[in-house]
Each structure stands twice: as C-alpha cells, then as structure tokens.
C-alpha cells in the first residue's frame, strides 16, 4: 500500500512543471511504475520457478532491465524495489555484504540498459 501512495505522490510532484498537463504526465509515470513493478515481480517469479543455482544475478538484471525500458516510472520502481529487497535481505539472508554488492551491481547494470545475459549462467533453460 505504501508503494502505491509513494508512486502517486511522486508522480504528481515530479510532473508539476511539465509542458503537457501535469495529470497526463503523472498518469504516464504511474503506469510506467506499475508496469515496472510487474516486470520485477515477473523476474522474481521466474527466478523462483527456475530454482537454478547461480542465476539470481541474471534475474536481478533482467527485472531491472525490463522495468527501466518502460520509462522513468519503471526505472524508479525498479530502483525502489531493488533497494528495499537488498536492504531487507542483507539483514535476513546471511549471505553477506559481498552478495548484496553483487546483486546491486546486477540491478544497476540492468537499469542502465546493459544486457542481462551478462549474468546468465550456463545451462539456464532457454525459457528464461
């Protein structure tokens, strides 16, 4: 619920000085953000389904890449979700700071438009 409130408020604030009506720009940002959140969820769902050792960085990069391609709202949603996930996981998973840094690198790579296949492990089914 907080995510949606943040998306709505940020959309209005960011679009206040737009050339076209603020509401239309805010609506586009919100649509991008919702689509980006969906892309992130889909990558997470695929990662869980694949259950393939060493593929988590690929799915991190792919989710961020897909979300960022939607536009500024998608990139924003990807950053918020990735940061929240990593902050939560770093205290719970016990995998350590090195794994968190590697995950964040894959997140940034995907959001910047880098090819997610850079992190794709050999043997991962082509379905993903």
Image: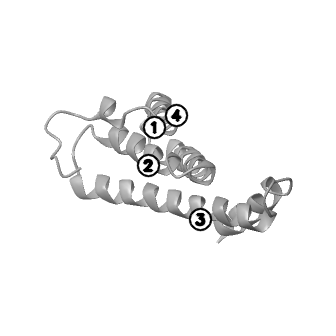
Q: Vertically, is 59 above or below 117? A: below
Q: Residue 125 appears at what percent x and percent y?
A: 15, 47
Q: Identify the residue under disc 1.
A: 110
Q: Earlier in the sequence, mark 2 or mark 4?
A: 2
C-alpha span from label 1 to label 2 = 8 Å
Identity of the residue drawn at 54% across and 49% down: 78
Q: Residue 109 appears at what percent x and percent y?
A: 47, 32
Q: Residue furthest front?
A: 20
Q: Identify the residue under disc 3.
A: 31
| Tag 1 near tag 2, CB within 8 Å | yes
Image quadrant assignment for residue 99: top left
Q: Is residue 100 visible?
A: yes
C-alpha span from label 2 to label 3 = 14 Å
Q: Nearer the viewer, residue 19 or 43?
A: 19
| Lateral position of residue 29 relative to residue 126, left or right | right
Q: Nearer the viewer, residue 38 or 2?
A: 38
Element at badge 4? loop
Q: Which mark is residue 112?
A: 4
Q: Which mark is residue 66?
A: 2
Element at badge 3? helix
Q: Earlier in the sequence, mark 1 or mark 2?
A: 2
């Amino acid at each position: 619920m907080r995510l949606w409130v943040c998306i709505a408020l940020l959309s209005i604030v960011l679009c206040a000085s737009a050339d076209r009506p603020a509401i239309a720009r805010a609506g586009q940002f919100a649509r991008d953000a919702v689509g980006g959140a969906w892309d992130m969820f889909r990558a997470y769902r695929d990662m869980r389904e694949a259950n393939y050792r060493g593929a988590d960085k690929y799915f991190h990069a792919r989710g961020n890449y897909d979300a960022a391609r939607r536009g500024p709202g998608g990139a924003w949603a990807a950053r918020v979700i990735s940061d929240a996930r990593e902050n939560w996981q770093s205290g719970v998973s016990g995998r350590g700071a090195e794994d968190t840094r590697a995950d964040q690198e894959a997140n940034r790579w995907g959001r910047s438009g880098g090819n997610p296949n850079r992190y794709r492990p050999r043997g991962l089914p082509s379905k993903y």
